[in-house]
Image (tube, grey):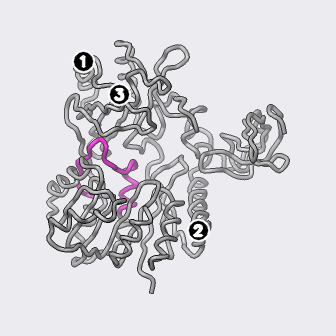
Amino acid sequence: MKKNDVYRVKIDGLTNLGFGTARVDGMVVFVPDTVTGDEADIKIIKIFSSYAVGKTEKLIHASPDRCNGRCSSDTCRSCAYKNISYEKELELKANDCISSFRKEGLSHILLKEVVPSPKLTEYRNKAQYPISKGKNGEYLIGFYAPKSHRVCEARYCPLTPKIFGDICSTLEEFFKKYALSVYDENTGEGLLRHIYLRQGEVSGEILLTLVINGDKIPHGDILCDTLSVRYPDIKGVLLNKNTKNTNVILSSDFTLLCGREYIYDTLCGVKLKISAPSFYQVNHSACEILYKKARELAALKKSDTLLDLYCGIGSIGLSMAEDCKQLIGIEIVPSAVICARENAKEAQIPNAKFYTGDAKNTSMLLKNAEDELGRKIEPDVVILDPPRGGCERELIEFVSKLAPARIVYISCNHSTLARDIKIFNSFGYGTDSAIGVDLFPMTGHVETLTCLVKNG
């Protein structure tokens, strides 16, 4: 095999990053924008020690699963499953979950279903757009191309509300008018880094954060006036100062430019206050299904204490609070804890208490809460909804020693979920089933939840 060689291949698989797979002379070749069952002429563009990358020169026969038109971008490739039908996408996601369980020796776990998302487009209530400059000096606002920091223009992504694209275009006008510079990660110079938007699905309220490499943005008052006239749903504009050479988008340094620092939304009947850095599920309608499933698995009794780790603004716990005696939430982001407390007060939920703490720091995890309550916390049910990296082994051991009757684990990464279930097994907790809920149509991600109980 040589670079620029052309081969006719049959695509025999599809990765969750959206690359079709074929074999040439026994070597795996990854081909973007192809689908299992496609027959195509491909050109080899990169060769590595154990695999190669090709691109389609000509599609000879299209797979029956191919479904063009879900996304028109030919450069972004953030939507791994844009070229297949939604039915096939759900099938692949189910197979991926099952495969993760098998890799960890958990073949006994039954994936009951993958619940489809009620919305397939414009479902994302949050988007973070990197800003760059094109070859001709134009502003590029979109997403990074796969495995690169090259920005692909994608402000009108089919997964985000159209108004996000409109706001980005208005911001571009402002950038042009005042010739604002763009951050260069090689030199560390330039002002503009990211546009960060989030919207309440029910309220329609929008919060805009500009991530900048500096202390202020020129003519910020003019920007606020312009936005308030064109977009009355924008309730706040913030600046986030991030001067570090890092891939982390947001720092902890927020400054309010105008309006307020938060928006409201309603989820599972609970009105929620949401700050810029707070975690909030990106797909509102599918999230309501997810939380309903979690509530069923929790099977709370009126005498129970519910411990919600990684609680964010309290959305999961508050949706279940009426089922239990007491809800205790732990969250590392201080502004999220403030929102959680205010959300409980607004919803008139007196049995909810929220505390700032790092779920990774098991030795201090409940100290503040226990000191304030004046007694040891003995949860009957624990909810875990960690980041993609999953739970620390120390946390799993800590939660197991608390000896709750049930542990409801919600995960956006079935690989780390499977890993953590296996660790829970070593501490006496197990499960025989899981449920998928698709919060991320067109992408390779799916939310998975399960309930772990004490063995025997």
Q: Could you say which disc has been placed on residue 320 in the image?
A: none
**Which percent across, then down, holds residue 324?**
23, 72
Looking at the rendering, the stretch of residues picked out in magenta corresponds to 268-291
Q: Nearer the viewer, residue 405 or 64?
A: 405
User: Is 248 drawn above or below residue 384 in the view shown?
Assistant: above
User: Is 157 drawn above or below residue 431 in the view shown?
Assistant: above
Secondary structure at numbered mark 2: loop
Q: Residues within 10 Å of mark 2 (few under 14, many from 20)?
A: some
- Per the image, the residue denoted by label 3 is 212
Q: Of the residues under marks 2 and 3, which one precedes in the sequence?
A: 2
Residue situated furthest bottom in the rendering: 456
Question: Is residue 355 covered in magenta?
Answer: no
Image quadrant holding the C terminus, namely bottom left
**How many badges with numbers are in the image?**
3
Query: Taking 373 as reference, is 84 left or right?
Result: right
- Per the image, the residue denoted by label 1 is 222
Q: Which of label 2 and label 1 is nearer to you? A: 2
**Which percent across, then down, holds residue 186?**
50, 25
Q: For the residue marked with disc 2, what is the amino acid?
A: Glu
Query: Taking 377 as reference, is 416 left or right?
Result: right
User: Is 202 drawn above or below residue 341 in the view shown?
Assistant: above
Mark 2 vs mark 3, CA separation in Å = 42 Å
Q: For the residue marked with disc 1, what is the amino acid?
A: Ile
Question: Is residue 273 covered in magenta?
Answer: yes
- Per the image, the residue denoted by label 2 is 104
Q: For the residue marked with disc 3, what is the amino acid?
A: Ile
Which residue sits at x=26%, y=47%? 265
Image quarter of residue 227:
top left
Q: Residues within 10 Å of mark 3 (few under 14, many from 20)?
A: many
Image quadrant holding the N terminus, namely top right
